[in-house]
Amino acid sequence: MKAKLDHIVHENRDKTISSFWFETDQALDYIAGQFIEMTIHHPKTDDRGDKRWFTISSSPTNAPLMSITTKFSEESSSFKQTLQGLREGDEVIISDPMGDFVLPKDKSIPLIFVAGGIGITPYHSIIKWLSDTKQSRDINLIYAANSIGELVFLEQFEHYGLSLQLILNNPPANWEGETGYLSGQRIIDLTNPPRDSLIYASGPEKMVESLQSSLETLGMEKYRLVGDFFPGYSTI
Ligand SMILES: Cc1cc2nc3c(=O)[nH]c(=O)nc-3n(C[C@H](O)[C@H](O)[C@H](O)COP(=O)(O)OP(=O)(O)OC[C@H]3O[C@@H](n4cnc5c(N)ncnc54)[C@H](O)[C@@H]3O)c2cc1C
C-alpha cells in the first residue's frame, strides 16, 4: 500500500534518530510490536537495495498515522539518504504488517524487555498502546545504548510507570546508572527473572543471538525467550 509522509520528528538532539510519520492510503491493521517492509524507489540505489524492514514504532491508537523510527550513520546507505530527504507528501510503499514480537495474551505474565540501541522501537509501540488503552502489565525494561544522546522515548516509558534500567557504553562523567555491555548474566542479575516471566530481546542481530544463547546456557528455557533482530547494524 502507499504511505504519504506526514511529518518527521527528531527524537534526539543531534538528529541521528528520527521518526517518520506516514498516512496510509488504506487502514493499517497491526498489533503493537509488528514490522513492515518499506520500499523507496530512488536513483543510484546502492547494493543494499531499495527495501528495508522497519518495526512500526507508533501504536495502533495513532491511526490514521503510523511511524517508523530509525538511526542515521555518518555514512548512510542510499536508502537511508533518500528516506532522510523525503518531504511532506512524498510517497513510499509499505507491506502489510507482520511478525510475532507482540505481547502474550496472558496479561499476568511478567515481562522483561531488553533493547539494544534502535531495538527500542517495538517496545515504544507496545508501551504507547498499553498506555493509551489503559492496560497495566508487569514490565521491566533494560535499555542499553552507546551514549546518553542515543536514548530515546524515555518520557513515554516514565509516563507508563514501568521499571526502567539504562545501560550506557560511553557514559558521561556524572552518570550514576549502569555502564558497560549487555550479557545474559547481566540481565539475570538486574531483573532476577520470575520463573514464569518471558524475556524479549530486540536490537542488532548479533546482540540478540548472543543474549539468547547465553541465557539458554544459563538455564533459561527456550520458550521463555522472544527475539527480534535487526540485520544491517553491527553495533547498538
Ligand atoms: C524485523 C526487523 C525490524 C527492523 N526494525 C528496524 C527499526 O525499527 N529501525 C531501524 O532503524 N532498523 C530496523 N531494522 C533494520 C533495517 O531494516 C536496516 O537493516 C537497518 O536500519 C540498517 O539500514 P541500512 O542498511 O540502510 O544501513 P545504514 O543505517 O545506512 O547504515 C548501517 C551501517 O552500515 C554501514 N553501511 C551503510 N551502507 C553500506 C554499504 N552499502 N555497505 C557496507 N556498509 C554500509 C553504515 O556506515 C553503518 O555503519 C529492522 C530489521 C528487521 C529484520
Image (cartoon, grey):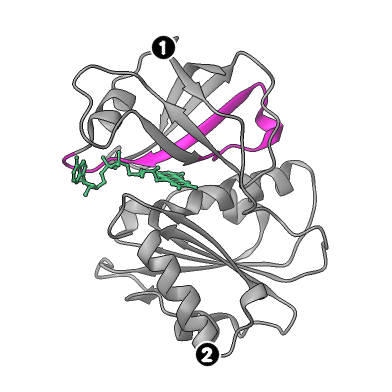
Q: Which residues are magenta?
A: 55-75
- Quarter holding the C terminus? bottom left
Q: Are marks 2 and 1 in contact (CB under 8 Å)?
A: no
Looking at this view, is 37 or 25 the one in front? Answer: 37
What residue lies at 48% left-to-right and 20% top-to-bottom? 93
Q: Earlier in the sequence, mark 2 or mark 1?
A: 1
Q: Secondary structure at mark 2?
A: loop
What residue lies at 73% left-to-right and 67% top-to-bottom? 138
What residue lies at 61% left-to-right and 13% top-to-bottom? 25
Q: Secondary structure at mark 1?
A: loop
Mark 2 surroundings within 10 Å by alpha-carbon count, few (fewer than 14), some (14 through 19), many (20 or more): few
Q: CA distance from mark 2 to mark 1?
A: 49 Å
User: Position of 110 compared to 38: left or right?
Assistant: right
| Residue 205 x/y as whole percent | 39, 60
Q: Nearer the viewer, mark 2 or mark 1?
A: 2
- Ligand 1, seen in the image, is in the quarter at top left
Q: Residue under circle 1?
A: 90
What residue lies at 23% left-to-right and 43% top-to-bottom? 73
Looking at this view, is 229 or 9 the one in front? Answer: 229
- Quarter holding the N terminus? top right
Q: Residue under circle 2?
A: 218
Q: In this rendering, is residue 139 above or below 27?
A: below
User: Position of 75 compared to 61: left or right?
Assistant: left
Q: The disc labelled 2 sits on which kind of residue?
A: Leu
Let me know if residue 56 is in the magenta part.
yes
